[in-house]
Image: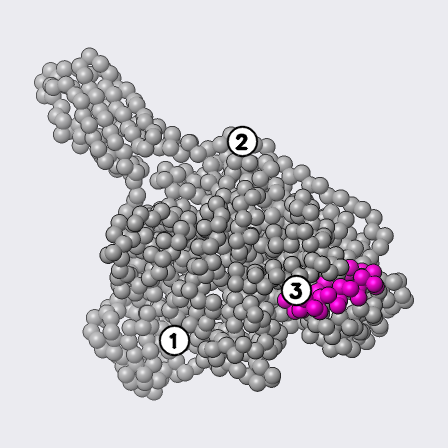
Amino acid sequence: MNYNKPELLSPAGSYNSLIAAIHAGCDAVYLGGERFGARANAENFNNDTLPKAIEYAHLHGVKVYYTVNTLIKENEMQPFIEQVGFLYQEGIDALIIQDLGVYQTVHQTFQDLPLHASTQMTVHNLQGAQFLEKLGFERVVLSRELSLKEITNIIHHSNIEIECFIHGALCYSYSGQCLFSSLIGGRSGNRGTCAQPCRLPYELYHNGKLESTPQNKFLLSPKDIQTLEILPQLMESGISSFKIEGRMKNPNYVALITSLYRKYIDLYLSNPERYRVDPHDLLDMHQIFNRGGFSSGYFYKKNGSDMMSTARPNHQGVKIGKVDQAINNKTIKISLEEKVYQGDCLEITTSTENNYSFIVKENILSSTHTFNMDIQGVKQGALIYRLTDVQLSKRINEELLSQEKKIPVELEFIAKIGEKSQLTLSYNHHKIKVWGTYVEQAITSAISEDKITAQLIKTGNESVYMRKIDLNIDDHIFLSIKELNALRREAVELLTKEIVQESKRPAIKATYNTNKKVNPINKGYINVLIRTMEQYEIVKCYLISNLYIELSSFSSKEIKVISEACAELAIKVYIVLPRIIRKDTSVVVMDLLKSVKKYPIAGTMIRTLDSYELVQGIGDMLVDYSANIFNNAAIDFWKQHSIKRFCVSPELNRKEISLLSNDALELVVYGYIPLMVTAQCLNKTINKTCNNKEEPYELRDRKKVSFKVFRDCKTCQNTIYNSVPIVLIDKYKDLKAIGISHLRLEFLDEGPKDIKDIMDYAVGMLNNQDLNSSDFNNIKALKNYTRGHLTRGIK
């Protein structure tokens, strides 16, 4: 059977990594600039190095995708669109984007520029992929949590290209739905500056009892994925592009991982029956980087402890020996399974908090060795790991990095006496001809064909090699070596110039046209999100405008009761869809939505674009903050898709919100903000199996700060909430001044008195009652809180 050849897409966090990826055999690279990318701490590219990178890649037949997989603030949109104009002119092959405001702006101005939807868009079902296809996206990078069965279903029922990660780091949360780093430290993953709190130690508590152990404290740290063993199944699925994660990794890593996937993709295409993975290749993969081994990701698993690296969050290396004897913390005798070389970095496990690592100063070729060093906590039986391998680095350099990749060219040379010599170079559809001087008959010694051939194939530092040479020359002619060299150099220069110029585009003036609307806000609205019937019984007693009910928390019968009662109270009821609606839960969601259509429901609220198609025909549509609205272009996009109200991102500050159109803006002014929405299960990580009980857990960090964990066993999903609620209900006048008319209160698991106190204050404040700071300070539920990013913001 013949399978379509998938694109091999490699990371390029620097120019050297780009060269490494191309030499190792990638089909495309993805890279970022100094701004707007999700790896702000990578070396990245500026406007001087970008053209050079694009030209080098295109010369070797490699595509270049530019990452804009972050959210763009309103005041950045003009410099951003100017940057896109620069990239467009230089011939970038596609943009990888997260922000629908970016889509709205780029698609209007650069209509022929291909757009790829980043995994940061959280596209996780068929409806989301089809929605993007209708918008004109060329490709979507699906959420990494999807199974191969789900991916195949999307491929079979859509015409959009599908890209999937096949190697590298996994985020604990669904990409695009993580605010952990942002809200606890001000470094946002949505802005490319994630501090990776998922790689820090935590403790897990259940009903006040410690469930986790000190030996397994990195509870949110997944292993990297590696898919060589299941590559045939991935290739058979029809995935268009295989993506390697790693823009923060060095060129050695990029070169090795790219070369191995190139090797096995080509092996399966050429001879599926002979497909076997060499254990030595797997060993090299482990040596270059692994976090306690690899997993194959979510392709065949929903979650599990074997996907997690709870013992350590960083590179483990490869085990090569153990300690046979430790004497007085000063001498250790070891036995080795492998030879060790000068420059290798070894690590010895210890009984202390930190293991001991050191650089080897001499070759160790025997199976036993004695080290004399001051080292604490090493005991007999301690394991020895090699973290870096100088021999592997040397091999990567010799076989991949130093071997310049050249393009294969066909050469034809004609030399007829009395006519100008003619040299033609051909590569794919390109053909270049150059002419020399008139050819003369030799007076004494003639130049031989071998000599001509030798000069014409001598490409040196040039970027081509002569795959085929065809000479058509008269006998006994004279040609100077200097002229032959000049002809070859001229032809090569013209050919390479033509190849790289082919992708260039004419300049387009790029201007960001905002449609900001500023309307006076004469009235404020209180909107409340509830999750239980008990919360509803309290909230219904207050004069509120809109009631949001979590679809996954209520039965159809309960929704009927709530909606009919609220209709009599002139309270509009909106159904709030789950953030994640996978294929196995979409039937339940769609059945519920179908049943509530006949109730007096005002409409629905969607949290990601995947839900848009599901809620058509069920009243007005609202969009939640998890859709990541950062700019007016995003608001315009959703307005064009009939959205009536917009909850702005909690990552925007006061000034940034004030720049947005204010005709229908909502902000969460009370509530525990979800930090992570994950397909992993903390109970299963600790206990290996799931008890299918939706009991609350508690995650504690190094500073003993507690984060609530709620489990939804119906969807096999955990949500980690912030340690304290965001509280802005006392800032109504300030919020009104920056354009916020709708104030949202979200209740999680607060007690009845706390809910009443918060509702009393919020409704009283909106009705201009004479409330002062003491009224606010007397509310017990508001003793510990955060103002979020309203005053500080994110970079």
Give the image location of residue 347, x and y in percent: 36, 73
In the rendered image, the vertical position of residue 175 relative to residue 333, given as above or below = above
Asked whether the residues under the numbered discs 1 and 3 touch, taking CB atoms below 8 Å apart as contact, a structural biologist would say no
The amino acid type of the residue labelled 2 equals: Ala
**Sooner in the amino-acid sequence: mark 1 or mark 3:** 1
As helix, strand or loop, the secondary structure at mark 2 comes to loop
C-alpha gap between disc 1 and disc 3: 52 Å
Magenta residues span 545-572
Q: Position of residue 736 (x, y in %)?
A: 80, 55
Q: Secondary structure at mark 3?
A: helix
- Front-most of residues 127 and 465: 127
Q: Position of residue 325 (x, y in %)?
A: 29, 85
Residue wearing tag 2: 507
Amino acid tagged 1? Tyr
Which tag, 3 or 2, sits closer to the chain's start?
2
Residue 142 counted in the magenta span:
no
Q: Which residue is mark 3?
A: 551
In the image, what residue occupies the spot 45% across and 80% down?
Answer: 215
107 shown above or below 313 = above
Magenta span contains residue 563? yes
Camera-side residue of 612 and 345:
612
Q: CA distance from mark 3 to mark 2?
A: 49 Å
Amino acid at dot 3: Leu
Specify the farthest residue to the left.
444
Residue linked to disc 1: 356
